[in-house]
Amino acid sequence: MKAIGIDIGGSRIKAAVVDTDDGSLITKRQRIDTPRPATPSAIIDACGEVLETFGDISPVGVGFPGVVRDGKVLTAQNLHQDWIGFSLEEALSERLQRPVRGLNDADSAGVAEVRFGAGQGVDGSVILLTIGTGLGSALFTDGKLVQNTEMGRMFFGRKREAEDYVSGTAKERDGLSNEEWAKRFEEYLKHLEDLYWPRMIIVGGGGAKKFPEVKDLIKTRCELRHATAKNKAGIIGAAVWAADQS
């Protein structure tokens, strides 16, 4: 099945047509800078612009950097606050004149990894963590997504939010070496293991490009893997999610 995946980010909006049977991109990715201010109307118009070359393919899935529930945005930390309570699916469906399904961007990346990537075929609990400006998360149980987990917002140990302790922003802000960051990240992963007892933790996101260089420094009970879909994960996962819901 063909579907369109959109990945809304703080700096860019990316989209492509996806073969949801195998996770491959049928078209080249189209990109556009995220407008500023990143209001709902500006983002909706930008999504319409980036999809112009794809024709009338449907459905459309969209990964959004915040909590999305019942088609509405509940948090939007890195975008405009007018997003809070905004009906993302309804507005984008009206703009594109086709069905749209929305979900959190880390959840979207997780769908791609569990369906086609590092977490494919793994039973039990699987956690995906996306490292970047913030810290995103996705939780799966026997391949089924538990939406909007927001594990980057949890407090642990030093009474700091995980996002403030181990994100890419935290590493740069605190001037951490790879070894120092790995020690922090291991501390955080142990906390997640104590809570969820996952079979696997997958690490992805723009801030995880060099994760293979530090992976062996991090000790976990469960299997620890680097994400395979990389910067295509959000697009692929959004398209697959929309196809599954249609």
Image (cartoon, rainbow, N blue to C red):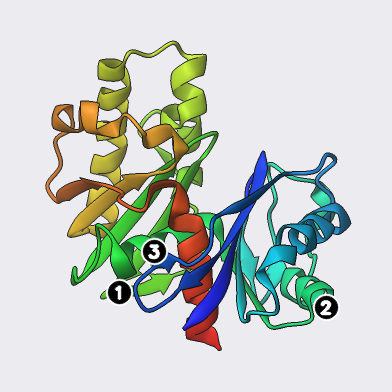
Q: Which residue is mark 2?
A: 94
Please tell me whether mark 1 or mark 2 is closer to you in this view. 2
Tell me which label, 2 or 3, sits earlier in the chain: 2
Instruction: Classify residue 59 as left or right of residue 50.
Output: left
- Is 123 or 8 nearer to us in this picture? 8
Please tell me how many numbered marks the rendered image carries: 3
Q: Which residue is mark 1?
A: 143
Q: Secondary structure at mark 3?
A: helix
Where residue 112 is drawn, which disc sits there?
3
- Is 1 or 13 nearer to us in this picture? 1
Query: Residue 207 in the image: x percent, y percent?
Result: 43, 33
Instruction: Classify residue 128 as left or right of residue 216.
Output: right
Kind of residue sitting beneath label 3: Ala
Residue 151 sits above or below residue 186 on the image: below
Tell me which label, 1 or 2, sits earlier in the chain: 2
Q: Residues within 10 Å of mark 3 (few under 14, many from 20)?
A: many
Callout 2–callout 3 Cβ contact below 8 Å: no
Task: Name the residue: 56% across, 89% down.
Answer: 246
Where residue 8 is drawn, which disc sits there?
none
Q: Secondary structure at mark 1?
A: loop
Query: Residue 41 in the image: x percent, y percent?
Result: 87, 58
- Is 239 or 132 nearer to us in this picture? 239
Q: Secondary structure at mark 2?
A: helix
Task: Name the residue: 33% across, 60% down.
Answer: 113
Q: Residues within 10 Å of mark 1 (few under 14, many from 20)?
A: some
